[in-house]
Amino acid sequence: MEALIQPSVVDGKAALQARAVAKRYRGGVRALDGIDLDIPVGSICALVGPNGAGKSTLMKAWVGFERPSSGSVAVFGINPWRNRPAALDRIGYVSQKPSLYRGLTVADHVALAGSLRSGFDPGPTRRRLDELAIPLGQDTRTLSGGQQAQVMLALALGTHAQVFVLDEPLASLDPLARREFLHVLVDAVRADGATAVLSSHVITDIEQACDRLVVLGGGRKILDVPIAEAISSHRVGTAEALPETAGAQPVGTFPGPFGERLTLWLVPPERADDPALRGATLEEVILGQLAASRSPRTPTQGQPS
């Protein structure tokens, strides 16, 4: 898969950064455990991991809702805890659950966004709501869960944000609405040179919109590569397909569609055509990485060399 926009940095800074970020809650529960991450400007990054992997915690840290126990996060080089207004002015954030105000209409929310956010443009928001046939005069309490999510997504588009942080916002949408929004998101990123981080468990969402893959597991970064590279550097076979001494590394074992046991392998370029293995799909790369994330001894993988 080709990148939608060539990733880059602005003034030497990534759009979003995390440096040695750890987050611990009462009782010693670790949500994040030493995360180092750079989200390149212009990329649409899929953030993937099992429940409890730390995805939402990391996203909330970038928008200033969760303070790391140690380490630091930055939005275009700005620490959201030291200068929250400047950081938030660059972010369009949509959480897992819509957070609309009871008793206000859709139009009220559009007006409120304009009063609270400098540079808010109601045009894209109104056009998106019109496409969805969501009346501006409707009380948001009467909207379905999917419609409420669409209102939140439409409001985010109106911010013309430099980076969109989307924490599983599509979960309540039907398949057509999901595809439509992802199309709108990709267009917005292309048009404005923006960046997006999308947390999702749905492979088709990732395939449609994303050009980079970050996998978290147990609060750690397991994989961080462009999607095209993730696919080209992995192969699938049985656990006994290749010895580790051949340069290929087993990543994780998972069930195939017919109950067979498949193993994802990380292979060097010289082993890419080995007949003992076949090419991996994006779904198989993600399944193998998720299986690997269950092991407490799983090493962090950066970009394959």
Image: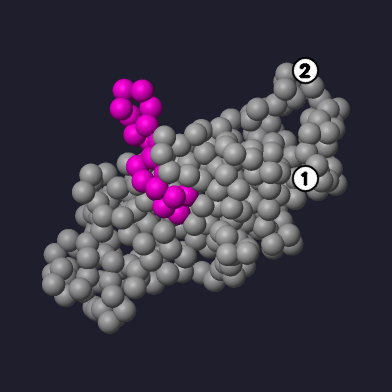
The percent coordinates of residue 115 (x first, y second) are: 83, 33
x%, y% of residue 172? Answer: 58, 35
In this rendering, the answer to whether 291 lies above or below 14 is above
Specify start and end residues of the magenta stretch as a single range.
18-37
Classify 267 as above or below 192: below
Does residue 226 lie above or below 23 as drawn?
below
In the rendered image, the vertical position of residue 184 relative to residue 278, given as above or below:
above
Q: Who's the residue at 83% across and 28% down the image?
A: 108
Mark 1, Cα crowd under 10 Å, few <14 / some 14-19 / many 20+, is many
Q: Is residue 304 left or right of residue 82?
A: left
Q: Is residue 180 visible?
A: no
Q: Please name whichever residue, 233 or 93, is drawn nearer the observer in this view of the structure.
A: 93
Helix, strand or loop under label 2: loop
Q: Which of 141/38 is in front?
A: 38
* Circle 2 Cα neighbour tier, 10 Å, few/some/many (<14 / 14–19 / ≥20): few
- For marks 2 and 1 on the same chain, the one whose residue lies earlier in the sequence: 2
Q: Quadrant of residue 137?
A: top right
Residue occupied by mark 2:
103
Amino acid type at mark 2: Gly
Q: What residue would you read off at disc 1?
A: 158
Q: Is residue 204 magenta?
A: no
| Residue type indicated by callout 1 | Gly
Q: For the residues labelled 2 and 1, say whether their Cβ atoms are less than 8 Å apart.
A: no
